[in-house]
Amino acid sequence: APTQVVIIPIRQQAEGVLETADQIREKLGGCRVKVDDSDKSPGWKFAEHEMRGVPVRIEIGPKDIEAGQAMVARRDTGEKVAIAIDELETEIPKLLAKIQKEMLERARVHRDEHTYDAHNAEEMADIAANKPGFIRAMWCGDRACEDSLKETAGVTSRCMPFAQETIADTCVCCGKPAKKLVYWGKAY
């Protein structure tokens, strides 16, 4: 994300709120941080930065400063926790790394759950019509087979992995000896 952390001052006109927000921004120098000191309401700012994809939001107001803490919200889970202002410098980078790791793992699981194997053209057409995602199938390397699969199943080649596997000995389309494992998919 272009901005990793946004700091939203609550009741920013109150004494010390903007100064504390700026101090937090300076402490988080290793991250891409923005203080939203616009005149819009906090709720509007929350929605704006959520739509922009900012992964972490820090809310700081007079009551938070008095308690020595800030409220930290994660965009990906909606979880909101209080973290001591003195600990933000170490906790925010850890949180960003955790968010990255968890989102990557969720994406991998989703990809793997939506990847199917096809051994013939009928099976490929059925999967393409009824299951969204990728289809792994063997291919002979002939352009005519690729064109045929595009016509009959509505799929086109997406990639040939560097680490090749063999899931069948024959081409999914013509039945000739297969040369490559290919990931196929529909264009949406």
Image (tube, rainbow, N blue to C red):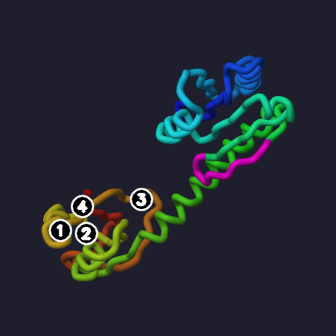
Crowding around mark 4 (Cα neighbors within 10 Å: few <14, some 14 to 19, many 20+) is some
Q: Residue at x 22, y 82 (%)?
A: 122
Mark 2 or 3: the one toward you:
3
Q: Nearer the viewer, mark 4 or mark 2?
A: 4
**Which is more N-terminal, label 3 or label 2?**
2
Q: Callout 3 environment at 10 Å: few (<14), some (14 to 19), or many (20+)?
A: few
**Residue holding disc 4:** 156
- Residue 183 locus on image (x, y percent): 35, 64
Q: Residue under circle 1?
A: 145
Give yes or no for contact between labels 1 and 2 (Cβ–Cβ under 8 Å). Answer: yes
Give the structural element (helix, strand or loop) at label 4: strand
* Rendered location of residue 69, percent (x, y): 82, 36
Residue 150 is situated, as x and y percent measured from the top left of the image, at 17, 65
Of the residues under marks 1 and 4, which one precedes in the sequence? 1
Dot 2 corresponds to which residue? 140
Q: Which kind of residue does numbered mark 2 sit on?
A: Cys
Q: Please give the residue where the numbered disc 3 appears in the rendered image.
A: 161
Along the viewing direction, whichever of 146 and 114 lies nearer the viewer: 114
Distance from disc 4 to disc 2, alpha carbons, whole Å, reads 14 Å
C-alpha distance separating marks 1 and 2: 8 Å
Q: Earlier in the sequence, mark 4 or mark 3?
A: 4
The image quadrant of residue 157 is bottom left
